[in-house]
Amino acid sequence: MAKIFISLGSNIEPERHLKAALTDLDYHFEQLELSSVFESEAVGFDGTNFLNMVVAAETELSIAEVVSTFKQIEQDHGRVKGAKKFAPRTLDLDLLLYDDIVSSQPIELPRAEILYNAFVLWPLAEVAPSLLHPVVNQSYQTLWNNYDKQQQSLWPVEFNWSA
């Protein structure tokens, strides 16, 4: 079983879409561990605030199969295939880590935004504080502690979901 970490985000009916995504992830993957949910301003475009979180899970699927599953879940919840990168979205699922694999194909791992987006790093540090980033060889908690928190504003919000 591989340990994976998934970034979830939404700014169109975000609470509804995050809950639906969690239900789907619970169906496809095992041993879900959830971070807190954080609200943040849109990054890269003007738009309504996002809700973001990170989920750890276990899987026997390959990296390509995991990514394909994410794309299907996104489409099932109204994400338009080929939509602009910096735009509102119903659901965004990104594979951040797959064990400690470093790769560029079929996708870049670890995902680069771990190091520069607070809405990814803070929840990742919550679910995997002592895990080491496989490239920079620092724990996610250390990376979050050293992160320039003036760059992006985010705050934890109340969120309830049960499997």
Image (cartoon, helix red, strand yellow):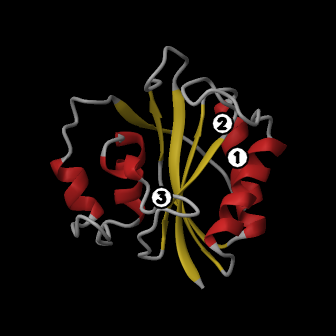
Dot 2 corresponds to which residue? 15
Q: Is residue 134 left or right of residue 60?
A: left
Q: Is 47 drawn above or below residue 105 in the view shown?
A: above
Q: Residue furthest right?
A: 76
The residue nearer to you, when weighing 161 against 110, is 110
Q: Which secondary structure, mark 3?
A: loop
Q: Position of residue 90 (x, y in %)?
A: 70, 33
Task: Give the residue type that dot 3 points to.
Answer: Glu
Q: Is residue 123 left or right of residue 26?
A: left
Image quarter of residue 127 = bottom left
Q: Quadrant of the N terminus?
A: bottom right
Task: Give the residue type that dot 2 points to.
Answer: Glu
Q: Which secondary structure, mark 1?
A: helix
Task: Give the residue type that dot 1 points to.
Answer: Lys
Q: Which secondary structure, mark 2?
A: helix
Label 2 vs label 1: CA separation? 6 Å
Q: Residue at x 33, y 28 (%)?
A: 153
Q: Position of residue 20 (x, y in %)?
A: 75, 47
Dot 3 corresponds to which residue? 108
Residue 19's label in the rendered image is: 1
Q: Quadrant of the C terminus?
A: bottom right
Q: Is 157 drawn above or below residue 69 in the view shown?
A: above
